[in-house]
Amino acid sequence: MITLHHCVSARSFRPLWALEEIGVPYELKMLPFPPRVLAHAFKEVNPLGTIPLLEDGALSMTESAAICQYLAARHSPGVLDVAPHEADFGRYLNFVHFGEATLTFPQTLVLRYTHLEPPERRQPQIVDDYARWFHARLRTLAPLLAAQPFLCAGRFTAADISVGYALMLAELIDLNERFAPSIADYWSRLRERDGFIRAMRAQEAAALAQNVPTIPSPKLRP
Ligand SMILES: N[C@@H](CCC(=O)N[C@@H](CS)C(=O)NCC(=O)O)C(=O)O
């Protein structure tokens, strides 16, 4: 049985969404955020103290985009996965990693210096610089998404989950108002998916059952 360690609406939402899209059985272990501070025992299973942590037998994985790529390849060939023989294989891999490395990296600086640091350590200059960074990189997707419904391969894939989570986080930290129209439409399409809605409901139900705060998800409640 796959086990996913998750904090509400954090990057571990990427693998949760992938699991729900695929329909593979899993156990969801909820943690308060940040687990490094609020759940010390978690470091015994993940010395980094970060989420996600996905356990599949003897395997442990800690990178949200890599976990989506793994789940898609192993459990969803030809659907969420794009195979090496398909024309869009390279484009697919690039978007899977673009979602985390290019889009979510600047977002985490905005989040940290607007919400997570105490008021005396907030840094408006960093927030402004990295919000611009995020928008400049996101804008490069606008022409593509004006011409096609998903990023690659003519279907919804794990690449859309990786980039889609960056759009979800953008909404949570108020970076969505400057979405280009084609990106706003793409985000609407993604959040209306049954798999996305099931993942939102799964995290809420598990948080309630395991007595973990459900913030900051109310904005995104289906
Ligand atoms: N590149 C990793 C980043 C993992 C990461 O930094 N996760 C954040 C939550 S979104 C975390 O656990 N932060 C808490 C901390 O650093 O203590 C991924 O994509 O999963």
Image (tube, rainbow, N blue to C red):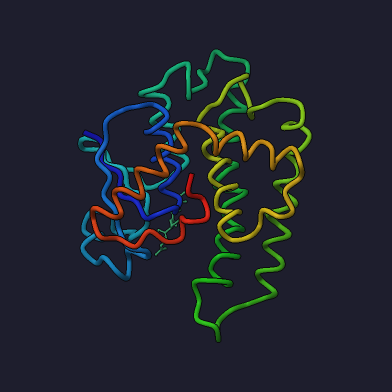
Q: Residue at x 63, y 28 (%)?
A: 150
Front-lying residue, 191 or 160 = 191
Front-lying residue, 93 or 115 = 115
- Does residue 176 lie above or below 84 as drawn? below
Instruction: Residue lying at the far front in this picture: please name it.
Output: 222
Front-lying residue, 5 or 207 = 207
Q: Quadrant of residue 98?
A: top right
Q: Residue at x 69, y 61 (%)?
A: 131
Q: Quadrant of the N terminus?
A: top left
How many marks do you count on the picture? Answer: 0
Q: Residue at x 42, y 34 (%)?
A: 18
- Does residue 58 lie above or below 103 as drawn? above
User: Measured from the top left, where is residue 106 in percent x and y?
Assistant: 61, 58
Q: Residue at x 69, y 37 (%)?
A: 185
User: Measured from the top left, where is residue 151 in percent x and y?
Assistant: 64, 29
Instruction: Residue lying at the far bottom in this picture: please name it.
Output: 120
User: Measured from the top left, where is residue 182 in percent x and y?
Assistant: 74, 37
Left or right side of 166 for 10: left
Q: Quadrant of residue 76?
A: top left
**Ligand 1's quadrant:** bottom left
Q: Quadrant of residue 190?
A: top right
Instruction: Residue lying at the far right in this picture: please name it.
Output: 143
User: Measured from the top left, where is residue 22 in percent x and y?
Assistant: 39, 26
Instruction: Residue lying at the far top in this picture: please name it.
Output: 85
Left or right side of 163 for 116: left
